[in-house]
Amino acid sequence: MHAMVMNKIGGPLEWTELPDRQPGPGEIRIKVAACGVCRTDLHVLDGELPAEHVPIIPGHEIVGRVEALGAGVSNLRIGERVGVPWLGHTCGVCRYCVEQRENLCDRPLFTGYTRDGGFATAVIADARFAFPLGEAGDDVALAPLLCAGLIGWRSLVIAGKAQRVGLYGFGAAAHIVAQVARWQGRSVFAFTRPGDEATQAFARELGATWAGGSDELPPEPLDAAIIYATVGDLVPVALKAVRKGGRVVCAGIHMSDIPSFQYQTLWEERELVSVANLTRQDGLDFLALAPEIGIVTHTTAYPLRQANEALEDLRAGRFEGAAVLVP
């Protein structure tokens, strides 16, 4: 097998030939067909998440086909197309797992961070955390659903029954969530970098009621706002944009420091909450609905060897939607 390996924090990924790996008990080996490139991969590469395991193969939006089964695997079959998300393993016995909140597990493993991921021609995965994808849809188009889609879905659920939803940072997750929210009959307000007229036009093409810069207030108060951008300065901005009793959801795994703000900004029962990872039930719920919603992912495909280029293009915002690596 071949992989793009992170051998040191902050360094470029390196094209590496590795021995073929065999799945252990409860595991499967997947031949990777496509793997999305996520903002979290940049956080891992830049050391903004604690360096748990280096060297590591990044990538956690994996689409591929099962090519080997470990002992005890009976829920999947050889040749079946599956998707592997960020949450790659949970202990099953801590209080959070027992309470059906496995996204908060005390001893988790994360794909592409604490266990090798999908920037490779093959990957070993916990069979319990591989979602059957069926045969409908293109591999590249499906890949962003495995993280951008899933974390977007969870953040929208946590936003509650909000009718007017603001999305701060209109990238891979927001361009999927906008479609889900519109399908649900909600109004979407998109916030981009100030002056980014191209992305604002993209948001309007996807059905946004309004699109503008993050330095602007929406034309009417929001019921909820979801922050996908990793900019802590946006927290008080979003709180000022929501109505009394409104909710602000921080959807990233990492964010720059949140500046101090007056209590008045939070007062009147506004809420500030965060999203952590996802559960398998989130995946089952969202992936079952995705075909009905008719989600169209906007993707830019890169050969696996060009993973570094894809990451830098993501960092610089050189494409709309999501980047996807293809072995």
Image (spheres, helix red, strand yellow):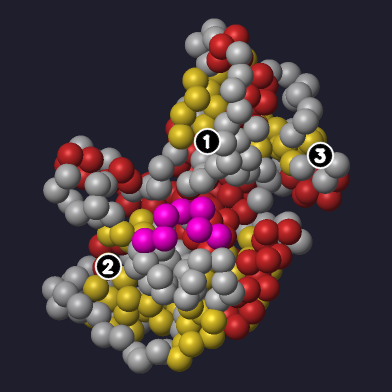
Give the vertical position of 14 relative to 255 (above or below).
Answer: below
In depth, the one of 183 and 248 nearer the eye is 248
Mark 2 Cα-neighbour bin, 10 Å: few <14, some 14–19, many ≥20: many
The numbered disc on residue 126 is 2
Which of the two marks, 2 or 3, is nearer to us in this view?
3
Quarter assignment of residue 207? top right
Please provide the residue range marked out in magenta. Answer: 46-52
Residue 76 position in % (x across, y down): 26, 72
Q: Amino acid at mark 1?
A: Cys
Mark 1 Cα-neighbour bin, 10 Å: few <14, some 14–19, many ≥20: many
Residue 224 position in % (x across, y down): 58, 26
Counting every numbered tag in the picture gives 3
The numbered disc on residue 313 is none
The answer to whether 194 appears left or right of 189 in the picture is: right
First reached walking from the N terminus: tag 1 or tag 3: 3
Give the vertical position of 17 relative to 63 (above or below).
Answer: below
Residue 33 position in % (x across, y down): 50, 78
Give the vertical position of 98 relative to 121 (above or below).
Answer: above
Residue 5 position in % (x across, y down): 48, 78
Q: Quadrant of the C terminus?
A: bottom right
Residue 50: within the magenta? yes
Q: Amino acid at mark 2?
A: Asp
The residue at which mark 3 appears reads as 194
Residue at point 71%, 65% (across, down): 313
Residue at point 34%, 90% (across, down): 20
Quarter assignment of residue 100? top left
Local secondary structure at mark 1: strand
The numbered disc on residue 250 is 1
In depth, the one of 303 and 49 nearer the eye is 49
Local secondary structure at mark 2: strand
Residue 49: within the magenta? yes
In depth, the one of 258 and 59 nearer the eye is 258
